[in-house]
Image: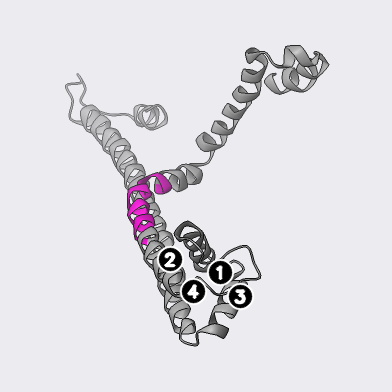
C-alpha cells in the first residue's frame, strides 16, 4: 500500500505538496520493507551481526592504515615534492600526499603516481613496493580476516542456539512421557492412543 501511495498518489500531487514532510516520510517508511528479508533469511542476520561485531577491530585496523599512510605521506613530501606529476595527485602537501598514498594502497591509478617518481628516484620503487605489500596485502586483508572471524563466531552461536532449543524440546517431550509413565494415574498404564496424543500435541 505504501508503494502504491508513493508511486501514484504522491506523483499526482503538485511540486509544492511534494515538499511536505509527510510525503517524504512515506518514502522513508518504504525502506522498512527491507526488514522482512532479514526475518525470512537468517543468513542475512548472521552477515550483519558479523559486520557489527567486527566494527571495533576494524577501527583499529583503520587507525593502523591511517598511521602508515600519514608516515609515508610525510616521507613523500620530503623526498618527492618537486617531481612533476601528470595526474592531479602528488606530493606537494601532506593532505595531498595522504590522498595519493591512499590511492596507491588501493591500487587505483597507481602507475600515474609511481612511474614519474621512479624515473626521478630509482630507490622509490622499493619504497612503493614495501608500502603496497604492507598496506594492500597486509593491512587491508586484515579487514577481511576480521569480518570472516566474527561472522564465523556469530554463525556458531546461531547453530548452538538452534541445537539448544532442539535439546530443550526433546527433553520436554521426555519429561512429558515420564510424567505419564511414572505419574499417579489410577491405572498406571499408558495406552497407545495416549502416547500418540502426547507425540502429536506438544
Q: Position of residue 91 (x, y in %)?
A: 51, 66
On the image, the x and y values in percent for residue 92 come to 51, 64
SS for dot 3 = helix
The Cα–Cα distance between marks 2 and 3, rounded to whole angstroms, is 17 Å
Determine whether the residue tagged by mark 4 lies in a helix, strand or loop.
helix
Residue 61 shown in magenta:
yes
Residue 30, x across and y down, in percent: 63, 26
Q: Residue at x 58, y 33 (%)?
A: 34
Which residue matches tag 4?
80
Q: Nearer the viewer, mark 2 or mark 1?
A: 2
Question: From which residue to which does the magenta span run?
Answer: 50-64
**Is residue 190 depicted above or below 47 in this figure?**
above
Residue 133 as seen in the image, left or right of residue 180:
right
Q: Nearer the viewer, mark 2 or mark 3?
A: 2
Dot 3, how many residues are within 10 Å of its Cα: few (below 14), some (14-19), or many (20+)? Answer: few
Residue under pointer 1:
107
**Mark earlier in primary sequence (2, 1):** 2
Q: Residues within 10 Å of mark 2 (few under 14, many from 20)?
A: many
Of badges 4 and 1, nearer the viewer stands 4
Vertical placement of 192 versus 148: above or below? above
**Residue tagged 3:** 111
Q: Quadrant of residue 33?
A: top right
* First reached walking from the N terminus: tag 2 or tag 3: 2
Mark 2 = which residue? 73
74 versus 14 height, above or below = below
- Relative to 176, is 146 on the left or the right? right
Give the image quarter of residue 1: top right
Amino acid at each position: 500500500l505504501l508503494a502504491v501511495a508513493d508511486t501514484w498518489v504522491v506523483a499526482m500531487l503538485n511540486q509544492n505538496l511534494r515538499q511536505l514532510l509527510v510525503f517524504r516520510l512515506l518514502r522513508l517508511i518504504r525502506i522498512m520493507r527491507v526488514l522482512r528479508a532479514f526475518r525470512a533469511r537468517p543468513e542475512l542476520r548472521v552477515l550483519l551481526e558479523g559486520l557489527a561485531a567486527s566494527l571495533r577491530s576494524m577501527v583499529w585496523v583503520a587507525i593502523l592504515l591511517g598511521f602508515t599512510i600519514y608516515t609515508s605521506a610525510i616521507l613523500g613530501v620530503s623526498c618527492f615534492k618537486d617531481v612533476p606529476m601528470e595526474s592531479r595527485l602528488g606530493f606537494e602537501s601532506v593532505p595531498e600526499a595522504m590522498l595519493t598514498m591512499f590511492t596507491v594502497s588501493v591500487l587505483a591509478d597507481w602507475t600515474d603516481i609511481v612511474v614519474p617518481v621512479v624515473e626521478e628516484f630509482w630507490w622509490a620503487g622499493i619504497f612503493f613496493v614495501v608500502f603496497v605489500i604492507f598496506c594492500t596485502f597486509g593491512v587491508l586483508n586484515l579487514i577481511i580476516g576480521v569480518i570472516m572471524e566474527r561472522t564465523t563466531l556469530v554463525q556458531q552461536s546461531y547453530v548452538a542456539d538452534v541445537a539448544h532449543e532442539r535439546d530443550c524440546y526433546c527433553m520436554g517431550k521426555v519429561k512429558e512421557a515420564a510424567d505419564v509413565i511414572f505419574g499417579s494415574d489410577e491405572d498406571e498404564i499408558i495406552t497407545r492412543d495416549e502416547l500418540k496424543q502426547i507425540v502429536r500435541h506438544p
